[in-house]
Amino acid sequence: MSLVDNIFTSVTSLNYFYEWITYLDKLQKL
């Protein structure tokens, strides 16, 4: 269970990081 939680947290963090990068990219294109 701990391993699954660890993977889930990692995926969630990567997803959040990607969303933030996309957001910054949109700001620069304005």
Image: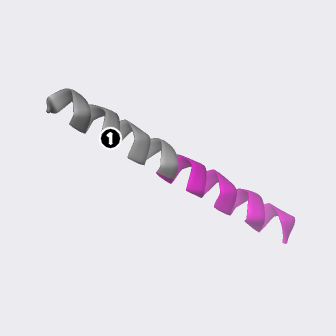
The residue wearing badge 1 is 8
Magenta extent: 16-30
The percent coordinates of residue 21 (x first, y second) are 64, 52
- Coloring applied to the structure: one colour
Identify which residue is drawn at 53% across, 48% down.
17
The percent coordinates of residue 11 (x first, y second) are 42, 41
Give the left or right position of residue 17, taking residue 1 as reference: right
Q: How many marks?
A: 1
Q: Residue furthest left?
A: 1
Identify which residue is drawn at 58% across, 56% down.
20
The percent coordinates of residue 28 (x first, y second) are 80, 62
Give the left or right position of residue 24, taking residue 6 as reference: right
Crowd class of label 1 (few under 14; some 14 to 19; many from 20; radius 10 Å): few
| 9 in magenta | no
Q: Residue furthest bottom?
A: 30
Give the left or right position of residue 20, taking residue 7 as reference: right
Identify which residue is drawn at 15% across, 31% down.
2
| 27 in magenta | yes
Give the left or right position of residue 22, taking residue 12 as reference: right
Give, as a three-letter code, the residue at label 1: Phe
The vertical placement of 30 against 3, above or below, is below
Magenta stretch, main secondary structure, is: helix
Q: Residue furthest right?
A: 29
Quadrant, the N terminus: top left
Q: Of residues 12 and 1, which is closer to you in this image?
A: 1
The percent coordinates of residue 3 (x first, y second) are 22, 27
Quadrant, the C terminus: bottom right
What is the secondary structure assignment of the residue under circle 1?
helix
